[in-house]
Image (spheres, coloured by chain):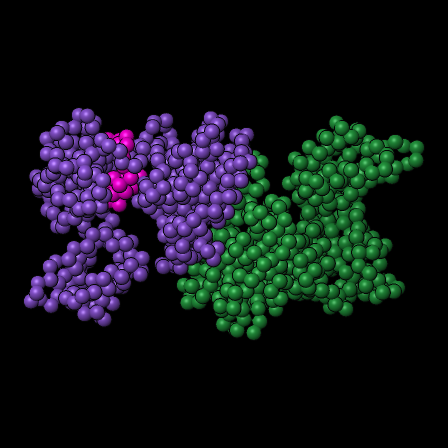
Chain colours: A purple, B green
């Protein structure tokens, strides 16, 4: 007998009919002889509605109270799901984040899980009940309600799967798996059957919205095999798992574009040791996530340089505040903000063993007459900052160039591109930067 | 410096504007030098909406899950109220029933408070914050979320006032106090300035909807002076407090009619000891609240009698189930249910010291050509079961007969009615039945 964690997103519990559909899946897993834990998001647009309610009261509500408010969304879902399972003649019990013992730090609206005291949940499982858990929420050590930020319900599901040593972690969503890119922008996008944690992590961080990065990090850390699948059909979806030999045969697994970034340029930053660290410490203390950082060179004879970086648009107000402080008190000459940017990225562990990948991407963008403003790379990613108006065109061009619309066995790109020498040795050294 | 508990009902927090109005009251009390605890109900029709949501899933949802669902309503209110107070430049913190340490028994949807571990709340008060508490909800010893049933938020407010030894307990509502009867039915109804716990208890139990009986019981038990007042105007409202000398000068304080009852008649109940106890034990075990019980006499030569009682309409399904059991397994011949009944009641501690009160009420009903089907009395109440179609007419007739539309000093009724001998001695013996 196995233990299965099933997570249903907001659209999969949007109304009574959908709730019963999800309940049926949980019951089926139970009748197949498994212990079942169901993790839920808030129904449909509930979270947005609650945010709107808060906005009517305050433009910048205290984050603690925001968490108090938002946590109600999942609590409604779990109560209704437990009712639906009872109505179908099976035993279920719902548990909030506090009740399931999901303890987080105190960073409200984007808390991190510290530990899970799962004995209460385990007891209900031992009593043969389907346990319905509110995703996205927890409590800190002081018993304040916290939420995990975007994609938090996925994180809850993966964390529970890890702590319970689950045999499967199924993420049900309104798409039937992870795609090579956003099918709404590129209709030729293909479903990916298997993807490694690292690839999924990078895709999530550069704009693939199927699963949030933090949940993948959790899955990687605890080696939880995650299956992303449709709540409406029975396809196998996409497995997200540890890398295995042969994965590098595919040069690029997916491509994505982010249009929710803004670029910040600090002009005339003083050239003395520690100044950059100081700037980013200031941003970090406000919990601003900084994306790529580009600093032009300090020449010996110059007293200052420019530092550019990208941030999430949501943090713009806070970043402007920090920038104003830097200008008024830390000798930065001025700052510029460009909100009309996008970031196009390609991701694949195959980059480790193939050369010329970055060049091929730049050529594809060039052929589409798209100007590249910045370039950044990591071991399995090549990314470029472009004009936001070019975002869709860029994604289509890159997707086609790397033959992502073709089945793996039909792709010719891996064969035409040169394999690097000693490719196999490099695979074992993650995070080491290699030339592309 | 005092400590004030303020409770705002659903209509007083129905939208952002109302929430800011309520926030202003709390802040004013704070600025006047008090520590302030605010207890809230769910916004406007939220609770009804949640019940409707549950009905879409199940006609008889598990009560534990119903509590899980309903508790979200108050959680939304407290978060928004805390935001509104912050937005107005003051410190506030919201606490759920669990966080405030309100421990109840495990009778879901109508739990009773066992104790309150107020140290957390006290700490926030010591930190000079306005503390916003979710009314209506608590947790049992197993940390399951419970709700206190109708009027539960009032109970929370009074219980907190008791445990914190508050100097005032203000119940804000959409009416400006307790009235001699329902002004929608009797436009001549007058606001009552002071009413005793016992009178308010009886009025609540017979249909006055301003405050629920359980909250009054709490207030009486811990001698909390409750002030019921309008959230929209600044009038003093009505004080509910312990009886004091002089209260008995008013013969009847108020009148009310209940139209949410059903009458049950058990026909042919066997005449042997313990059978009635058995019947009502059975109802009690399903948490059915039985109102008046009328049993006709067992004559020596008869083997059976009829037992009648009234119940809340809401419990009708459960009562029918019990009745069917009684018929099939306990020798009861049959049962009849009459849903078209109403109960008209008059309440006043003055009844203890005045005679002829019941007679005067029956004459008023008779003059209005209303047939009395049953009569029940207690020390400070006279009640009659009548046809539901006569409910409003009956209330108007009785209200006029006892001059409830007149100021106390203008009433002639107390003077025209004979004072009982030794009336003062009787006042000290509560619950002892006296002839009316």
Q: Residue furthest right?
A: B301
A144 and B305: which one is in front? A144
Residue sitting at x 23%, y 43%: A430
Q: Residue furthest left?
A: A301
- Image coords of residue A94 (percent x, y): 51, 41
Left or right of B167: which side holds A16?
left
Residue sitting at x 41%, y 51%: A114
- Image coords of residue A159 (percent x, y): 40, 43
Indicate the quadrant where residue A251 lies.
top left
- Image coords of residue B341 (percent x, y): 71, 41
B26 and A163: which one is in front? A163
Q: Give the range drawn in magenta.
A: A190-210
Left or right of A270: which side holds A97?
right
Residue sitting at x 11%, y 44%: A370
Q: Is residue B391 above or below residue A177?
A: below
Left or right of B435: which side holds A125?
left
Q: In this view, does A262 lie above or below A246?
A: below
Kindly tell me whether residue B101 is visible in this rendering: yes
Q: In this view, does A306 lie above or below A128?
A: below
- Image coords of residue A302 (percent x, y): 8, 66
Left or right of B324: which side holds A29?
left
Q: In which quarter of the image is the C terminus of chain A?
A: top left
Is residue A202 rendered magenta in the image? yes
Kindly tell me whether residue B25 is visible in this rendering: no
B361 and A377: which one is in front? A377
Is residue A408 rendered magenta in the image? no
B71 and A162: which one is in front? A162
Residue sitting at x 79%, y 51%: B377
């Amino acid at each position: 007998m196995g233990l299965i964690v099933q997570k249903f997103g907001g659209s999969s519990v949007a109304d009574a009919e959908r709730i019963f559909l999800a309940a049926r899946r949980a019951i089926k897993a139970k009748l197949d002889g498994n212990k079942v834990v169901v993790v839920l998001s808030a129904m449909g647009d509930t979270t947005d509605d609650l945010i709107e309610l808060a906005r009517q009261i305050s433009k910048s509500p205290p984050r603690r109270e925001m968490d108090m408010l938002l946590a109600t969304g999942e609590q409604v879902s779990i109560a209704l799901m437990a009712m639906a399972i009872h109505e179908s003649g099976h035993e279920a019990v719902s548990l909030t984040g506090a009740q399931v013992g999901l303890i987080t730090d105190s960073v409200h609206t984007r808390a991190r899980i510290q530990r899970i005291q799962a004995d209460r949940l385990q007891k209900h499982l031992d009593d043969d009940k389907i346990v319905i858990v509110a995703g996205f929420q927890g409590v800190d050590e002081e018993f304040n309600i916290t939420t995990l930020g975007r994609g938090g319900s996925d994180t809850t599901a993966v964390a529970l799967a890890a702590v319970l040593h689950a045999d499967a972690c199924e993420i049900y969503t309104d798409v039937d798996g992870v795609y090579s890119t956003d099918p709404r922008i590129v209709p030729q996008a293909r479903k990916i059957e298997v993807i490694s944690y690292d690839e999924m992590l990078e895709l999530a961080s550069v704009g693939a919205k199927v699963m949030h990065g933090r949940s993948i990090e959790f899955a990687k850390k605890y080696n939880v095999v995650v299956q992303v699948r449709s709540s409406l059909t029975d396809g196998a979806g996409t497995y997200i798992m540890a890398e295995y030999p042969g994965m590098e045969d595919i040069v690029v697994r997916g491509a994505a574009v982010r249009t929710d970034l803004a670029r910040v340029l600090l002009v005339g930053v003083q050239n003395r040791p520690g100044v950059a660290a100081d700037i980013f410490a200031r941003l970090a203390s406000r919990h601003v996530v900084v994306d790529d950082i580009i600093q032009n060179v300090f020449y010996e004879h110059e007293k200052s340089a420019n530092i550019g970086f990208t941030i999430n648009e949501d943090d713009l107000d806070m970043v402007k505040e920090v920038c104003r402080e830097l200008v008024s008190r830390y000798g930065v000459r001025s700052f510029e903000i460009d909100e009309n940017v996008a970031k196009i990225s390609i991701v694949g562990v195959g980059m480790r063993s193939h050369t010329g990948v970055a060049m091929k991407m730049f050529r594809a963008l060039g052929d589409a007459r798209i100007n590249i403003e910045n370039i950044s790379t990591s071991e399995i990613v090549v990314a470029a900052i472009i004009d936001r108006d070019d975002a869709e065109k860029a994604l289509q061009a890159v997707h086609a160039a790397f033959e992502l619309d073709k089945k793996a066995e039909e792709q010719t790109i891996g064969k035409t591109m040169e394999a690097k020498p000693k490719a196999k040795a490099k695979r074992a050294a993650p995070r080491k930067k290699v030339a592309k």
